[in-house]
């Protein structure tokens, strides 16, 4: 049996050869452990940078799509907070536009008030519908307080036919 007297060591993208007499096994292991720790730190830094880039991309794309759906710019932050955005990136890390659209639609379905700007200006195409929705909510609340379930069901059906979520 022949005895191995030299061992490769990875150091700064080069391979060095040291004999066991120079540093011994523990020296080699220590250098490898240090290099592994450096690579793990570098990998974590790159992962954080990638996550930050994805977060910025997602914010920009949510803002663009929300604006196309009639959401006022100052209300986009609420969609970012409320939407289920965990699954909008596919396995390759690409943004899935369809999943993003579904997530935004869900929030707008639950909170239609996020659409349109303030004061019924040019950016608020659904301003009248929002006023009617508030009126329907008040009427439904009054009917609930009186215990008039028939009126509650009737009002909810009318509101849904008009595209309102009450």
Image (cartoon, helix red, strand yellow):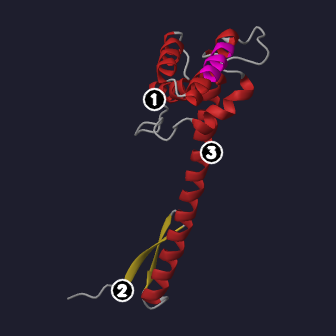
Residue 99: assigned label: 1
Q: In this view, does 117 lie above or below 38?
A: above
Q: Determine whether, in the image, residue 119 is placed left or right of residue 27.
A: right
Q: What element carries label 3?
A: helix
Closer to the chain start, of discs 2 and 1, is: 2
Quick check: is 153 in the magenta stretch? no
Which residue lies under the disc numbered 2? Answer: 5
Q: Between label 2 and label 1, give the one nearer the viewer.
A: 1
Task: Classify the position of the N terminus by image quarter.
Answer: bottom left
Which residue lies under the disc numbered 3? Answer: 52
| Residue lying at 46% horizontally and 87% vertically, measured from the top left | 26
Q: Between label 2 and label 3, give the one nearer the viewer.
A: 3
Q: Is residue 123 above or below residue 138?
A: above
Q: Main secondary structure of the magenta part?
A: helix
Closer to the chain start, of discs 3 and 1, is: 3
Range of the magenta residues?
131-139
Q: What element carries label 2?
A: loop
| Residue lying at 51% horizontally and 23% vertically, measured from the top left | 148
Query: Residue 140 location, x and y as percent?
Result: 58, 23
Cα separation between marks 3 and 1: 20 Å
């Amino acid at each position: 049996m022949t005895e191995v007297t030299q061992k490769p060591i990875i150091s700064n993208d080069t391979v060095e050869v040291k004999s066991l007499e120079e540093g011994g096994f523990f020296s080699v292991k220590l250098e490898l452990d240090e290099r592994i720790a450096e690579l793990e730190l570098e990998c974590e830094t790159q992962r954080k940078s990638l996550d930050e880039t994805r977060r910025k991309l997602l914010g920009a794309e949510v803002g663009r799509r929300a604006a196309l759906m009639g959401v006022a710019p100052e209300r986009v932050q609420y969609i970012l907070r409320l939407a289920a955005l965990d699954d909008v990136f596919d396995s390759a890390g690409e943004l899935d536009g369809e999943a993003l659209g579904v997530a935004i639609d869900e929030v707008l379905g639950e909170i239609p008030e996020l659409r349109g700007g303030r004061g019924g200006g040019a950016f608020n195409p659904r301003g009248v519908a929002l006023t009617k929705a508030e009126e329907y909510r008040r009427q439904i609340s009054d009917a609930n307080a009186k215990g008039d379930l028939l009126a509650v069901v009737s009002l909810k059906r009318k509101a849904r036919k008009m595209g309102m979520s009450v």
